[in-house]
Image: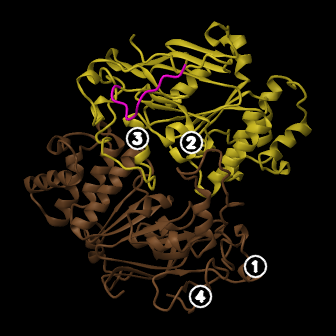
């Protein structure tokens, strides 16, 4: 797509540790356009959060970053310091998992919300206050004006996450990255927050990246999905195709391992044997091979490239023994 | 009648656990009282798995913990094997607790980081003597049965993954040959690919060791998978209780319906009734505690606590406006 807002091209992240390098993310390529929602799905250690933290410049100095990330055509890693300040917080904003730790417990909601607007936009106190109320209304916070005087501990988890989302929207970001935004919340509140993010994306024509471990969360609320495992993209496709035309054995295994509300009770689950990969070993094979029922010697000796299902198709997978049909074309998308 | 009644308790057979009119309250600042559990009654037959579901703060963990008298209930009775646990002295209660074991949500913080997993698993057996025929060889066998290679028994918890640590806590819980296993969110902290391994393991061990289980989870799909019966709690009270299939196929309490519809991909239509926040258990709403968030609520809901009515052979609902027709079964 030519109108990609954020484009990751072969992004890699390595951490130098006392015990040697850890290969957290290896050649990840994906993109998201304005108004589009991308879901990044993976288990812990899959590299999904590290990928987005690399984009946001939130990684420690021990991280060695390779590849290219462009935002609206501009290289993110070579931005000037001054440009960066505007990039983070104005062009791109991020919402994290635990709303209690993203908010300062000893500052009032209003003061925290106004800080970013006054810094980035030089708004006067009264203008910032009016904008804060407007944003709280936007995230459907009841009694918005009164909230400005409250402290985070006076709000429930769902309310706090609404405040964090409102803050992230303060400077009309073109892209919102939400990292497990509902994992700490009850299912009932989870639905409200996901609906809210979905609505905001449509109303504000914002690009949204939703990072989660739960396929169910992204199923109805994203345009496309990238499934990650061991720091790599296993399968990337329009959301419907990921479920209807699964190619990668990992994507398939993940769907089977999760109990479904429609399954009769006592249904034996189909677990994925073994444990997640050790990222301290330099990747030389398909990361999923040790746990994969389809694995052959080829999978254990070389890394499968990301292959399109058809020339120009948005559906790609990295597997030598995919499910369903054989690939028509080869090449990294 | 103040409470929702005990009519859901089964009269036939003798339940292994019988909880009647359980109330647990905690003192709060300025003379307030947190009404964590208010008049909860249920029973569990030997070999049965009871799933307890509800939002955080609904009292599901407190209810399960009150069964093992941690904390001691404010009022109400808990009988285990026809013995009222409140009537036991400290030493007798200690003995009974060997039958009632727990596993917790965070497997890493549940294990002492400075001790080997062998020490962790065998400590109960050491305290209680060999407890029948427990020997080192049988403990090895137990460790193997949860999927850990006994040659690693001298390692410490940090050398294992989260899923392996949960297997170790399960082995520790089973070392004393318990009758009842209380699982408090046992898979919530685990990755989805590991979650299925642990659920299958619990299922295997349940039949192998003839366990009765209380299974607490906020994940309704997991509860449906493991439970014979389900107890749906809201703000310290029971909303709906009964056979798992009956409740999941025909949710009748508006709260149960709202809860099920919130599950991503559940396919259950939602009337948006569950808007707003969970009220504070410090000052719960009068009448039916759900009336502040219920779209069917009327005057009577604000004044009168609903009693259980029967909606199926084993399906009980406490609601003034149930979404189904009551049945009378004689």
- Answer yes or no: are tags 2 and 1 on the same subunit: no
Is residue B329 inside the magenta stretch? yes
Quarter residue A258 falls in: bottom right
- Tell which tag, 4 or 1, sits nearer the viewer: 4
Q: At which x and y percent is residue B18? A: 61, 18
Is residue A10 inside the magenta stretch? no
Question: Does residue A113 appear to the left or right of B277 in the view shown?
Answer: left
Q: Nearer the viewer, residue A51 or A233?
A: A233
Comes first in the chain, label 3 or label 2? 2
Q: At which x and y percent is residue A40? A: 46, 68
Secondary structure of the residue carrying numbered label 4:
loop
Secondary structure of the residue carrying numbered label 3:
helix
Pointers 3 and 4 in contact (C-beta within 8 Å): no
Mark 3 — on which chain does it sit?
B
Task: Tell me the residue that label 3 is attached to.
Answer: B257
Question: Would you say the magenta stretch is mainly helix, strand or loop?
Answer: loop
Mark 4 — on which chain does it sit?
A
Q: Nearer the viewer, residue B315 or B266?
A: B315
Quarter residue A197 falls in: bottom left
Q: Colour of chain A?
A: brown
Q: Colour of chain B?
A: yellow
Badge 1: residue crowd in 10 Å (few <14, some 14–19, many ≥20): few
Task: Tell me the residue that label 2 is attached to.
Answer: B223
């Amino acid at each position: 797509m030519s109108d990609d807002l954020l484009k990751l091209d072969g992004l890699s992240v390595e951490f130098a540790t006392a015990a040697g390098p850890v290969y957290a993310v290896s050649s990840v390529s994906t993109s998201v356009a304005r108004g589009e929602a991308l879901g990044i799905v993976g288990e812990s250690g899959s590299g999904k959060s590290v990928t987005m933290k690399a984009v946001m410049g939130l990684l420690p100095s021990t991280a060695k970053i390779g590849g290219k990330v462009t935002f609206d055509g501009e290289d993110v890693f070579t931005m000037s310091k001054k440009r960066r300040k505007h990039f983070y917080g104005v062009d791109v904003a991020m919402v994290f998992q635990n709303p209690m730790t993203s908010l300062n417990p000893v500052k009032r909601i209003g003061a925290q919300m106004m800080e970013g607007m006054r810094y980035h936009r030089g708004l006067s106190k009264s203008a910032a206050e009016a904008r804060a109320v407007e944003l709280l209304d936007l995230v459907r916070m009841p009694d918005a004006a009164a909230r400005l005087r409250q402290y985070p501990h006076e709000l429930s988890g769902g309310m706090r996450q609404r405040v964090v989302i409102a803050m992230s929207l303060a400077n009309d970001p073109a892209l919102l990255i939400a990292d497990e935004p509902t994992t700490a919340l009850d299912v009932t509140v989870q639905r409200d927050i996901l609906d809210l993010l979905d609505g905001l994306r449509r109303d504000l024509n914002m690009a949204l990246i939703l990072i989660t471990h739960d396929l169910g969360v992204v199923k109805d609320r994203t345009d496309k999905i990238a499934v990650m495992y061991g720091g790599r993209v296993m399968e990337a496709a329009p959301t419907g195709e990921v479920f209807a035309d699964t190619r990668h054995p990992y994507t398939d295994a993940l769907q089977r391992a999760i109990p479904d509300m429609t399954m009769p009770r006592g249904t034996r689950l189909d677990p994925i044997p073994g444990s997640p990969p050790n990222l301290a070993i330099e990747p030389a094979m398909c990361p999923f091979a040790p746990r994969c029922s389809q694995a052959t010697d080829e999978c254990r000796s070389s890394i499968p490239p990301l292959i399109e299902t058809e020339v120009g198709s948005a559906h790609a997978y990295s597997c030598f023994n995919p499910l369903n049909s054989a690939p028509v074309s080869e090449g990294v998308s | 009648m103040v409470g929702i009644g005990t009519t859901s308790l089964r009269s036939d057979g003798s339940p292994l656990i019988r909880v009647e009119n359980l109330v647990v309250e905690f003192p709060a600042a300025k003379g307030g009282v947190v009404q964590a559990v208010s008049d909860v009654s249920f029973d569990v037959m030997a070999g049965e798995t009871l799933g307890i579901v509800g939002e955080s703060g609904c009292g599901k963990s407190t209810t399960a913990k009150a069964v093992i008298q941690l904390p001691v209930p404010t009022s109400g009775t808990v009988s285990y094997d026809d013995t009222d646990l409140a009537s036991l002295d400290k030493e007798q209660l200690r003995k009974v607790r060997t039958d009632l074991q727990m596993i917790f949500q965070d497997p890493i913080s549940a294990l002492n980081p400075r001790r080997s997993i062998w020490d962790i698993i065998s400590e109960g057996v050491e305290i209680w003597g060999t407890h029948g025929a427990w020997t080192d060889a049988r403990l090895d066998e137990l460790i193997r049965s949860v999927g850990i290679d006994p040659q690693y028994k001298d390692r410490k918890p940090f050398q294992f993954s989260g899923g392996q640590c949960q297997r170790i806590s399960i082995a520790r819980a089973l070392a004393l040959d318990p009758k009842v296993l209380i699982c408090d969110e046992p898979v919530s902290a685990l990755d989805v690919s590991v979650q299925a391994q642990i659920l299958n393991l619990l299922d295997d061990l349940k039949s192998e060791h003839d366990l009765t289980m209380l299974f607490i989870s906020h994940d309704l799909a997991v509860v449906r998978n493991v439970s014979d019966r389900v107890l749906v709690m809201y703000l310290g009270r029971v909303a709906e209780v009964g056979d798992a299939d009956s409740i999941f196929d025909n949710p009748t309490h508006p709260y149960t319906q709202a809860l099920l519809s919130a599950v991503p991909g559940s396919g259950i239509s939602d009337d948006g009734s569950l808007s707003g926040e969970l009220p504070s258990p410090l000052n719960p709403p009068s009448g039916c505690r759900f009336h502040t968030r219920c779209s069917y609520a009327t005057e009577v809901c604000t004044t009168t606590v609903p009693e259980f009515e029967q909606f199926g052979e084993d399906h009980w609902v406490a609601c003034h406006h149930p979404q189904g027709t009551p049945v009378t079964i004689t």
